[in-house]
Image: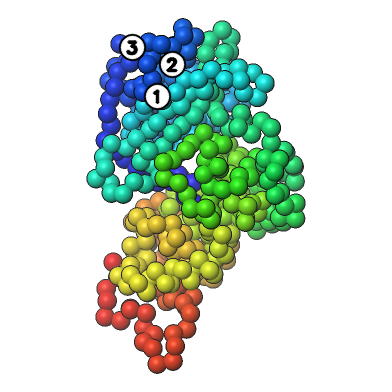
Amino acid sequence: MRRVLLVVAGVVAVLVAHGTVGAAQAASAAIDVTTLTPEAANVYRTWQRYLVSKGGKWSENAGLPSADWVDSEQRRRWPLYDLAGFYLADGATPTIVGIDHVTSCGDTAYRITTRFELGDQRLGAPSWFTTVTETVYAVTDGGRWVLGNALLRNTCGWRRVTVGAMTYVFAPDYPYNAARAHRAAAFVDSLASAFQVPKLDSLTYYLAPNVDEMYRIIGVESAVRSAPNAVGGLAQPINHQLFSGSPVIGEEYRHELAHLVLAPLCCARTSYLVSEGVPTWIGGTAGMDFSTAARGLAAFLAEHPLVSLDSMLSGQFPNAPFYPAGAVLTAMVFDRGGVAAVRGLFDAGRTPAELRPALAQLFGQSWSSIVVEWRRRVMAFAPSPPDGADADNGVRGREHL
């Protein structure tokens, strides 16, 4: 699953609160603000002020320093401190739907619930981002109200088990698998050695029973629910965090672990196809190993014969074909130059205009030849056709996009 989840642009409705807010994005309220107690009204104003400070860029500014957020989280625990905000669509319109006084994890706080909606329905069918609810908490600190994440409160009663550099955090009834945890610890050490990067020194690894619960503990809930058997995970290298939403993979989510281990190589000059392709080549994706994912890509190309490696560089395809597209390219690079060449991919350029000549130089051949070879490598994963069937896979007589 994409770690940024492709932030979607929407039409911004600008609202003004309390007469102190200029032309920035504040939240309307689905609650009767006039009925709030003075204390709750103060919490409301704190949250409004925080929202305005983001300028409608909820994901982009999730790590922007704020005097309204608890210091222990944003300065000492998580550089990207607004954990839920990172998964909101920039430009989504906020509406506060609840400010509730609660007792949580042994103390009292205010739970703030806000709905974020994309206003431009021309984007098509509702996506994960169309309507998302964020939950944060407000607590007193030095005589004033400050904001904090839902994660620590949602997991305060969970178990913790440390294996190597990783501390697994999971609910008491979660089916924790110690054997997988120990394999994961060996995996991250061997991967770091192979790519000559520092070994992980710490990682908090949250285990959730499904994808929706994985997001919920962070403080995010989408109106679009995940399929019961969906496989998903999130990695936040800067925060030393990993979230797994599938017990099938659970403690050994190699795709996300690869993101964390290889973070020192990424991402200032890294193409998105590379940043997801390398972890897919190493650790698979969506519960599939590399070969299985590549077979799915071969089936996709057979159904969409005009799609090419150039098409994939646009980054506009779903994860299912996009991730293995990058993984097959990574396998080609590895065959050409080993681990050193794969390391070089991370610095080969963010844009197609930068990546194409870098790969042409590596392979010593024209870009058009690389495109043809990539398709051949992908289609090699397809099952052999029955005797007598046309096996050209739709390549002959067609141009590549």
Q: Which residue is mark 2?
A: 44
In the picture, measured across the screen, residue 170 lies left or right of residue 297, that is: right
Distance CA(mark 2)–CA(mark 3): 11 Å
The residue sitting at 65% across, 54% down in the picture is 252
Up-down: is 94 above or below 271? above
Q: Residues within 10 Å of mark 3 (few under 14, many from 20)?
A: few
Up-down: is 243 above or below 299? above
Q: Secondary structure at mark 1?
A: strand
> Mark 1 or mark 3, which is nearer to you?
1
Distance CA(mark 1)–CA(mark 3): 14 Å
Nearer the observer, 303 or 157:
157
Q: Which residue is mark 1?
A: 96
Q: Amino acid at mark 1?
A: Ile
Q: Secondary structure at mark 2?
A: helix
Answer whether labels 2 and 1 touch (C-beta < 8 Å). yes
Q: Residue furthest left?
A: 122
The residue sitting at 61% across, 28% down in the picture is 153
Labels 2 and 3: the sequence-earlier one = 3
Q: Amino acid at mark 3?
A: His
Q: Secondary structure at mark 3?
A: loop
Q: Which residue is mark 3?
A: 18
Nearer the observer, 57 or 103:
103
Where in the figure is residue 397, as x and y percent of width and height? Answer: 26, 80
Residue 69 shows up from this direction: no
Q: Residues within 10 Å of mark 2 (few under 14, many from 20)?
A: many
In the picture, measured across the screen, residue 289 lies left or right of residue 220, that is: right
Q: Quadrant of the C terminus?
A: bottom left
The residue sitting at 64% across, 18% down in the picture is 107
The residue sitting at 26% across, 42% down in the picture is 121
Nearer the observer, 179 or 358:
179
| Quadrant of residue 213 within the rendered picture | top right
Numbered tag placed on residue 171 in the rendering: none
